[in-house]
């Protein structure tokens, strides 16, 4: 933990926006250097122009590759495109539009030149493709999500509206690197002409009443504070307040590509992660002013929930409460619709699902795994420990197939309105029934080689037969729900577990651990986890 974590950013912490944008146009990547290649992680290609990892050359090549990919898949409809508030997002969007226009793709930007949250773009794709058109739409979101201000991000959402799967992203990345290596001669570019528009904000906000009990929130007079953390949801929250007449205050409407108003994250960096107590330090000051205060990251696919009685909720705690509440208050959902969770989310969700008589769908990290279930209604809720989730409409049909931080933030208000209790109070009730787990994720710096080795580690390589005094009952390198590779390992006992996997977005690796036997037992689990993994890696 950095000594300044949770403290306001200083001038020395801020990036030079002009220099960052200049580097975007001036630095030419060398794709023989691994750090400068196009690489799609769990949520697209990310990097900084300062590092020659996110530059005009990259975006032009990626967009050309997307054009070729969508043609190979017979996708001929409009391409929805939106950007967040990062400094590199506008230049990247402009580059993409030049390539899309030259290739004859009908790109649709925001009607009001507003920022576009990831869930709003997913919502737009799904709405178009559900309307009976002869063609299909897809989309691009220009965002590095919660990453620091120096970063840019670019992700592709195919016609199902959610994150592209590995087959698509691998093809796009390989083709983009090939284009760059050959001097970008295959890239078609022109001044954008005939670019269409779409009212992302209006369509999304107007539709919220079909997934959230807005009337209950309004009737109960729930006092809501919303902090966009300088991200793309800023005008959405004010539109929601106006459209539905809610007692909702945007506590900080500031948009600043330097994020100079932020408090620093655990490692001393500016990062817009609403699940981090260090990031949310300024938001926590408002906890007694409202019934609930919420936060979102830069593209609004993540949520943070602050209650007067509990402060900032652990994302796992809130997901468990959301599951308990939703499956008891959505009669339009299929009675056999499963509860979706990622492998590194709390076992409390397993216990809640079991008590509800619902099947648990446990998948690897990455929201893309929930997409098929959300589309056909077989999975009514999908959630990640990193504060990302989405769920179905009241009638059991798909809402978004990407994470929706605005939706989950509004759900907290519905829960308060309907139950008369805060989500943190409801979580306490869950612990009284099912035990009180202690959960922690530790991030540590790792080389790319170390991350690669960990990502390929097989459960059979684990030789230990006990963990923190309990017999090991499972050594997983494939997810129980769908058999897909975890990209790491998970080791399970009766009352505890740990998982180790490399980060898909930063040069760190993550050890997740949880124990239902208390904090001291968790420390034992964490200590032994490192020993077990080191032994398996031969280090």
Image (cartoon, grey):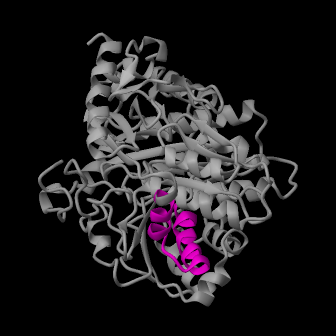
Q: Residue at x 37, y 69 (%)?
A: 310
From the image, give the main secondary structure of the stretch colored magenta. helix
Instruction: Give above or below for 257 relative to 353.
Output: below
290 sits left or right of 417 in the view: left
Q: Residue at x 56, y 51 (%)?
A: 191
Query: How many callouts does the rendering have?
Result: 0
Q: Residue at x 53, y 73 (%)?
A: 236
Residue 452, x across and y down, in percent: 39, 20
Residue 300, x across and y down, in percent: 49, 60
Residue 228 appears in which quarter of the rendering? bottom left
449 sits left or right of 135 in the view: left
Residue 496, x across and y down, in percent: 42, 36
Magenta residues? 405-431
Position of the C terminus by quadrant: top left
Residue 31 in the magenta stretch? The answer is no
Instruction: Give above or below for 462 relative to 414.
Output: above
Q: Is residue 164 visible?
A: yes
Q: In the depicted view, which residue is nearer to us: 392 or 323?
A: 323
Q: In the depicted view, which residue is nearer to us: 196 or 169?
A: 169
509 sits left or right of 436 in the view: left
């Amino acid at each position: 933990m950095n000594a300044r974590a949770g403290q306001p950013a200083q001038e020395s912490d801020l990036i030079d926006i002009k220099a960052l944008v200049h580097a975007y146009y001036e630095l030419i990547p060398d794709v023989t250097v691994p750090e400068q290649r196009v690489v799609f992680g769990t949520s697209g290609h990310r990097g900084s122009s300062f590092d020659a990892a996110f530059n005009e050359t990259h975006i032009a090549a990626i967009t050309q590759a997307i054009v070729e990919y969508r043609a190979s898949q017979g996708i001929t409809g409009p391409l929805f495109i939106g950007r967040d508030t990062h400094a590199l997002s506008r230049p990247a969007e402009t580059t993409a539009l030049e390539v899309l226009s030259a290739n004859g793709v009908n790109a649709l930007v925001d009607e009001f030149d507003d920022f576009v949250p990831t869930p709003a773009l997913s919502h737009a794709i799904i709405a178009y493709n559900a309307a009976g058109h002869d063609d299909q739409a897809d989309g691009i979101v220009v965002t590095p999500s919660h990453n620091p201000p120096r970063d840019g991000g670019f992700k592709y959402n195919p016609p199902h509206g959610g994150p592209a799967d590995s087959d698509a992203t691998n093809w796009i990345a390989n083709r983009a690197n090939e284009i760059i290596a050959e001097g970008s001669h295959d890239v078609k570019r022109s001044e954008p002409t005939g670019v269409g528009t779409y009212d992302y904000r209006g369509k999304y906000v107007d539709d919220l009443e079909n997934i959230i009990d807005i009337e209950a929130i309004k009737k109960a007079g729930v006092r809501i504070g919303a902090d966009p953390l300088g991200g793309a949801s800023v005008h959405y929250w004010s539109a929601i307040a106006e459209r539905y007449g809610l007692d909702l205050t945007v506590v900080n409407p500031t948009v600043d590509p330097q994020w100079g108003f932020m408090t620093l994250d655990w490692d001393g960096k500016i990062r817009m992660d609403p699940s981090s107590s260090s990031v949310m330090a300024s938001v926590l000051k408002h906890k007694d002013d409202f019934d609930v205060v919420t936060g979102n990251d830069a593209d609004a696919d993540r949520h943070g929930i602050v209650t007067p009685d509990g402060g900032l909720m652990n994302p796992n705690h809130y997901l468990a409460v959301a599951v308990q509440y939703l499956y008891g208050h959505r009669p339009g959902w299929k009675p056999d619709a499963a509860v979706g969770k990622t492998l590194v989310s709390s076992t409390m969700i397993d216990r809640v699902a079991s008590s509800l008589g619902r099947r648990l769908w446990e998948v690897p990290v990455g929201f893309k795994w929930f997409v098929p279930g959300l589309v056909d209604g077989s999975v009514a809720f999908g959630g990640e420990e990193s504060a990302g989730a989405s769920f179905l409409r009241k009638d059991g049909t798909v809402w978004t197939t990407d994470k929706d931080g605005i939706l989950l933030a509004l759900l907290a208000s519905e829960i308060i309105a309907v139950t008369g209790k805060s989500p943190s109070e409801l979580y306490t009730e869950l612990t009284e029934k099912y035990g009180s787990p202690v959960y922690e994720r530790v991030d540590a710096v790792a080389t790319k080689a170390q991350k690669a080795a960990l990502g390929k580690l097989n459960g059979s390589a684990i030789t230990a037969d006990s963990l923190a005094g309990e017999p090991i009952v499972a050594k997983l390198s494939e997810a129980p729900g769908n058999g897909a590779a975890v990209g790491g390992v998970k080791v399970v006992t009766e009352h505890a577990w740990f998982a180790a996997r490399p980060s898909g977005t930063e040069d760190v690796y993550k050890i997740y651990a949880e124990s239902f036997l208390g904090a001291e037992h968790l420390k034992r689990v964490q200590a032994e986890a490192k020993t077990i993994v080191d032994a398996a890696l031969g280090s």
